[in-house]
Image (cartoon, grey):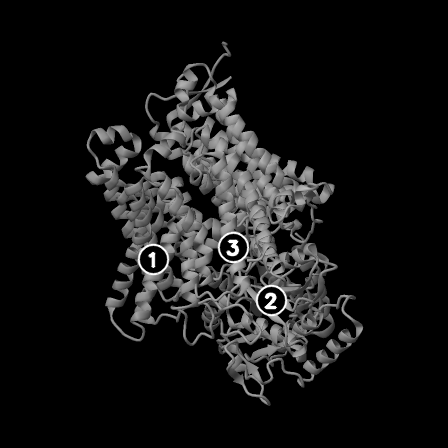
Amino acid sequence: MIRLEKRPEASQLMSYASPLIAIVLMLIGGLLLFAFLGKNPIEGFKVFFINPISDLYGVSELLLKATPLMLIAVGLAVGFRANVWNIGAEGQLIVGGIAASAVALYFYESEGIHILILMVIAGAIGGMLWAAIPAFLKTRFNTNEILVSLMLVYVAQLLVSWLVHGPMMDPDGFNFPQSRMFEDPALLPLLSDENRLNFAFVMAIGALLVGYVFMYRSFAGFQMQVAGYAKDAARYAGFSAKRMIWIGLLSGGGMAGLAGMSEVAGPMGQLTEHVSNNYGFAAIIVAFVARLNPVGIFFASLLMALLYLGGEQAQQYLALPSSISNVFQGMLLMFLLGSDVFINYRIRWKEATA
Amino acid sequence: MTLIKITTKKIALAVLAMAMTGTSLAADNVGFVYVSPIGDAGWTYQHDLGRLQLEKETGVTTSYVENVAEGADAERVIREMAKRGDKVIFATSFGYMNYALKVSKKFPKTAFVHATGYKLGKNMGLVNARFYEGRYLTGVIAGEMTKSNILGYVAAFPIPEVLQGINAFIKGARSVNPEAELRVIWVNSWYDPGKERQAAITLISQGADMVTHHTDSTAVVQAAEEEGVYAFGYHSDMSKYGPRAHLTATTHLWGDYYVQTIKQVQEGTWTPVSVWGGYPRGMIKLSPLNDVIPEALQNRISTMESQLRERTLHPFAGPVIDQSGSTIVPAGKNMTDDELNKMNYYLQGVVSTIPN
Amino acid sequence: MDSSILSSILFATIVAGTPLIIVALGQLIAEKSGVLNLGAEGMMAMGAIAGFAVTLHSGNPWLGVLAGMAAGIAMSFIFAVVVLTLMANQVASGLALSILGVGLSAFIGKPYESEILPTVGAIRIPLLADLPIIGDALFNQQALVYFSWALFAGITWFLYRSRPGLILRAVGESPSSAHSIGYHAIKIRYLATLFGGAMAGVGGAFLSVFYTPLWVEGMVSGRGWIAIALVVFATWRPFRVLVGAYLFGGVMVVQLFVQGSGLEINIPSQFLSALPYLATIVVLVIISRDQNTVRLNAPVSLGQPFRPEA
C-alpha cells in the first residue's frame, strides 16, 4: 500500500516543482473539462490560454489585471508567513480606493504632482486603517483576525455604496452612484499611449522588490518567518507576537489600499461601487500558489490574470459561461495545496504488514 | 454550444441574403455586453431576447459576454469586440458608460450604443426606455384592486430610474384611489433572491396586498403567490413564477430598437442620438393582464396604453406633489425630461423615507 | 406593535435563521474535531444546485435534500483529502473550496436558471400552531425548520452526553493524545469534516428548494461565511449557535420591517445592512476578551494539521 513518509528535510526540488505540477494538473483538468463539454480541447486551450496574450495589447492587459494582484499578494504574504491570516484585503482595497478618491475629489480642478503623491499615501493609509481594526482587536482582545477582517469586507462594500450614493456622488451625474471622473493630475501616468498599463505596474514591481528584501534580508522578516514555523521558538527568542500581528496586517492592508488607489486612479478614473472585482480574494490564492515568495507572486499573478482574461475569451468564442474562470482557479489552488505535501513527505510503497 | 449552432445557421442565412441582395451583410457582427448572467427573467434576459430577435430579423451574427463587471474589465471586453470588427456594440448597463465612450473614441468607424447613461459620443448613441409609463399603469391597477390600500415596493438602489418607477406607481394608484399608500424597502442589491423575498414578505405582513419590485430576480412574485396577494412583475413577464398572483408586468422590449439601429448602420444613416423610448416606440409594454382584473379596468388600461402611445397621457402631468407637500410641477404642465432625470424624492403617498 | 406584526417578525426570523443553524452546527462538529473549513459558501452553493436539480427532476424535495447532502459530502471530501491526508493549509484550502464550489455550481447550474419548483408546504402542528404570536412562528413551519431543531438537540446530546462526542472533543483538544490512547484521530477528523459538508449541503438545498425556491448563480449571497462566523460567535456551543442564528436573521428581518413601516429614520440603509456584520465583530470581541471563555470552548488544535508519527 501507499504510505507517506516524512522526508529527513524539506525537498528544495519539490518546493519549486509543486506549483508546476499543480499547473500541469490544472491544464489536464481543463482539457478534460473542455472535452466533457463537447469542445475541442486543443481549441479550448488555445482560446483560453493563448488568445488573450496573442498581441502586445493583450499582454498589456494581462499586466494591468495582474498589477493589483501583485500589490495585494506581496502585502499579504508578509503576514501569512507569520500565520497572520488577513483575509479581508478586499475590504482594505475598497477603503484605500475611497481614501485616494477623497483626495482626488478634494483637489478637483487643481494641478500638481502633489495630488498623485497624496493619493498614493491616502490609499495606503486607508487600507492600513481598515486592517488596523482586526490588528487592534487581535492584539488587545485576542479576537480572531480571519473573521473580523472578513466581516469588514462586507462593511467596506456597504460603505463605498453609501459614499457613491451620497457624499461622494458626482453632482452632475444625474444621481447615478459614481464619483466625478478624475482629471489628469489625479490619474496615474500611462506607460504607453497604446494601452492602459500605467505607473501602478512599476509600483507593483517595486513592492515585490521591497517585499523580497523585507522577507529575506531583514531581521523583522526573519522573526516573522520563525514565528510562522514555530510559535514557541519565536516566543522563547523574545520576538513580540503583537508586533508581528501589526506588521502582518498593516502590510497587507497598506498594499491592498494601494491597489485600490491604482484602480481608481488607473483604469477606472473614478470611484464606483465596483472598485474591486474580487482582487482581494484572488490575491490570497496568488500568495499561496506563489509559496509566499515575491518572485513566485509575480508569476502567479500573471497566471491568475490569464485565467480571468481566458474566461472572457471562452465566453465569446466557445460560448462557455463566465464561471469557468472560477473553476480553473479553484482547481489550481486545490492541486497546488495537495501537491505541496511532497515537499515534506515522499511516497513509499510498503508491504501491508499489519 | 447552442449559440455556435445558431450562429452558423445565421451565417448561412446571411450568405444567402447576400447572394440575393448583393449587399455585404455576411461580415456584420454585433456585440452585446451584459452585466449579469442571462438567466430566465430580468434586465439582461430582455436584452438577450432583443439580440435573438435581431439575429432572426436581420441575419447578422451576434455574440455576447455576460456577467461583465462594471469596472475596468468592461473596457477590455468592449475593445475586444471593436478590435475584431463588430459593426455595432451594445453596452447594456449604466456602469459601462465611461469605458464604452473611451473605446468609441479609438474606433471611430464602429457604432456604439450605451443603455441608460447620459454621455453621447461622436459614434456612441444612447438608449433608454420610459419604464415609468408601465409603472403608472400598474399603479392604476393596484390602486383599483387594493383592499388594504397599502402597496409594497422592493427596490435596489435610489437612482432616478428606480425613483421614477416608484413615483409613477404611487401616482397611478393615487389617481384612482387617493387613500392608497406605498411602502418601499431598499435591499441594496440588484440580485439577492433571499433578501428580496424576505422584503416582500415583510411588506405583505405589514398589510400590503399589492407588491412589486425593482430588482432582478423573480423572488417577489413567487413570495406574493405563496402569501396569497397580488404582484406586478418587472423587466419580464413573470407570470409563470406566480400564475395566480401575477397581475401583469412592465416588460422591456429592445428587439425593434436593435433591428432599427442595425438597419440604419447598414444603410449608413445611423447617427449617435439619445433615444428615450417608451410606449410610442414600442419599447415597453404590459404583459397579458391576469383574468382577475375586472374587464372594465382591463379596458381602461388598454385605453390608457393607446393614450400613452399617442402621447396624450403623461404619467408625471401636474400637479406633481412631493412627500413634504410642496408642488414640484404645477397643474397644467408636464414634468420635463431634465426634471425626470434628476428625480431624487418621493411623491405624496409614499410613507417610507428615502435613505441618505 | 400589534401582535400580528410581532408574529410575522418572529416567523421570518426563524426562517432566515434556519439555513444558518444547519450549516453552522455542521461546521461546529468539524471545528470541534480541529478542522477549520472556510469552504462553507462553496459547499452550500453546490448543495443548492444539486438539491434544486434533483428536486426538479424527481419532483421530490426530500430527494433534493439528500442530493444537496451528497454534494456537500463530495465537496468536503475533496477538502478532507487535501488537508487531512495531504496536510495542506486549512485556511487556504477552505478559500479554494469556496471559489471552486461557487464557480462549479454556477457552471453546472446554467440550464436550471429558467426552472421553477413548487413551494414546499408547511407542516402545521395542531393546537400548538394556534397559540398567539408564537404559534405560527414555531409550529407552522417547513419541515427543515423542525429538522434544524432536531439537529440542535441531537448535536447537543452527542457532544456532551455521548462517548463518541467525548472522543471527538478529545481529538479537537489534542489529536496526539487521542491518538496515543488508541483513537484514530485522522479518521475521526474525516468523519467530522464530512458531516460538516453534509450539513452545508442541506443548508444550501434549503435555500434553493424550500426558501426561495429557485436557483440562480450566487444565491447563497455570503450565508456560508456568516455561518462560519456564527460558530465562533457561539464559542462552539450549539445553543449559542441557535441564538446567534436567530439574532442574525432577526437583525435582517427587523431592518426590513423598520423600512417598510415608514418610520422616520434618517439612517442610510447601507448602515442598517451593515449591522449584522458589525454585531458579529462586537460579539467576537466580547467573547474573546475573556480568555477563559475561549479556552473552555474553543478546540485547541483548530486549524492545525495532525500526522501520527507511525
Instruction: Please state the chain letter of the residue tagged with numbered disc 2 in the rendered image.
Output: B
* In this rendering, position of residue A259 left or right of residue C251: left
In the rendered structure, which amino acid carries the disc numbered 1? Gly
Residue A96 numbered tag: 1
Residue to which mark 3 is pinned: C254
Spatial CA distance of label 1 from label 3 is 32 Å
| A329 versus B181 height, above or below | above
Q: Residue at x 49, y 50 (%)?
A: A50
Callouts 1 and 3 in the same chain? no
**Residue A295 picture location, percent across and down:** 32, 43
Residue B168 numbered tag: none
Q: Nearer the viewer, mark 2 or mark 3?
A: 3
- Which residue is more in the foreground, B3 or A73? A73
Spatial CA distance of label 2 from label 3 is 47 Å
Residue A58 showing in the rendered view = yes
In the rendered structure, which amino acid carries the disc numbered 2? Val
| C179 versus B122 height, above or below | above
Residue B256 showing in the rendered view = no
Q: Residue at x 32, y 34 (%)?
A: C291
Q: Nearer the viewer, mark 1 or mark 3?
A: 3
- Which residue is more in the foreground, A191 or C276? C276
Residue to which mark 2 is pinned: B30
* In this rendering, position of residue C25 left or right of residue A65: right
Q: Residues within 10 Å of mark 1 (few under 14, many from 20)?
A: many
Q: Which part of the image, by quadrant, shows the C terminus of chain B?
A: bottom left
In the rendered structure, which amino acid carries the disc numbered 3? Val
